[in-house]
Image: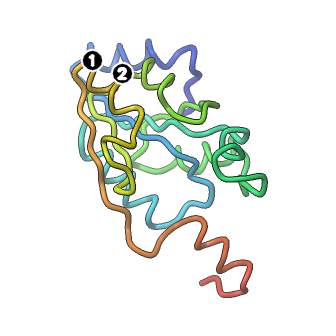
Amino acid sequence: MLVSQSDIAAFCRILRDGGKKVVFTNGCFDILHAGHVRYLEQARSFGDVLVLGLNTDASVRANKGDSRPINGELDRAAVVGALRAVDCVVLFGEKTAETIIEKVRPDVYVKGGDYTLETLPEAKIVAGYGGRVELVPFLTGHSTSKVIEKIQEGEAH
């Protein structure tokens, strides 16, 4: 389910008022692969509801370059939102997820193991209201960039 930025704070407040532990993660999720699925399943395991912040097309370009995204934001939202682990998707256009985290105020914020608490600008916000940050390892050998490289080299499996 796609929830607007204007509705996400109230949506998450209702969930928490109902006793649900809200987990949040974010990313581009451009070409979905097994690493993404495993990561999202791990993220969901930290609570009752997983809210996924999805970078808009403009935000992906700012983070990854002009050749990305491969898939548009509404297509990416539909695909990732169809996964069992993901309860709702909210689009955000900033380079980092700080603004959307202020709205969601997750009990647990999950990011991939390529980050540290020191390199994650959102960590201070989450700690500031008493939330927790979890860093989970990526599935080795799985990345959208590697998938794109294999396609370009004609080696996709």
Q: Is residue 130 above or below residue 135?
A: above
Q: Position of residue 102 (x, y in %)?
A: 43, 19
Give the residue number, with chain letter if any, for mark 2. 105
Look at the image and name its color scheme. rainbow
Q: Residue at x 45, y 75 (%)?
A: 141
Crowding at mark 2 (Cα within 10 Å: few <14, some 14-19, many 20+): many
Q: Which residue is mark 1?
A: 129
Asked whether, in this view, residue 148 is left or right of residue 124, the answer is right
What is the x, y in percent for residue 124? Answer: 33, 27
In front of the other: 82 or 125: 125
Residue under the image location 25 percent in, 17 percent down: 18
Mark 1 against mark 2, which lies toward the viewer? Answer: 1
Label 1, label 2: how far apart the Cα atoms are: 8 Å
Disc ID at residue 85: none
Q: Secondary structure at mark 1?
A: loop
Q: Amino acid at mark 1?
A: Tyr
Location of residue 88 in the rendering, given as x and y in whole percent from the top left corner: 47, 34
**Are the two marked residues, 1 and 2, in contact with CB atoms closer than 8 angstroms?**
yes
Q: Residue 55 location, x and y as percent?
A: 60, 39
Q: Horizontally, is 148 left or right of 44 in the view? A: right
Quadrant (top left, top right, bottom left, bottom right) of the C terminus: bottom right
| Of the image marks 1 and 2, the number of the one nearer the N terminus | 2
Which of these two is toward me, 18 or 90?
90
Of the pair 11 and 62, the residue shown nearer to us? 62
Report the residue that reaches farthest toward the front: 118
The secondary element bearing badge 2 is classed as: loop
Q: Using the image, determine if residue 131 lies above or below residue 26.
A: above
Q: How many marks?
A: 2
Q: Amino acid type of disc 2?
A: Arg
The residue positioned 42% from the left and 34% from the top of the image is 121
Q: Residue at x 58, y 64 (%)?
A: 144
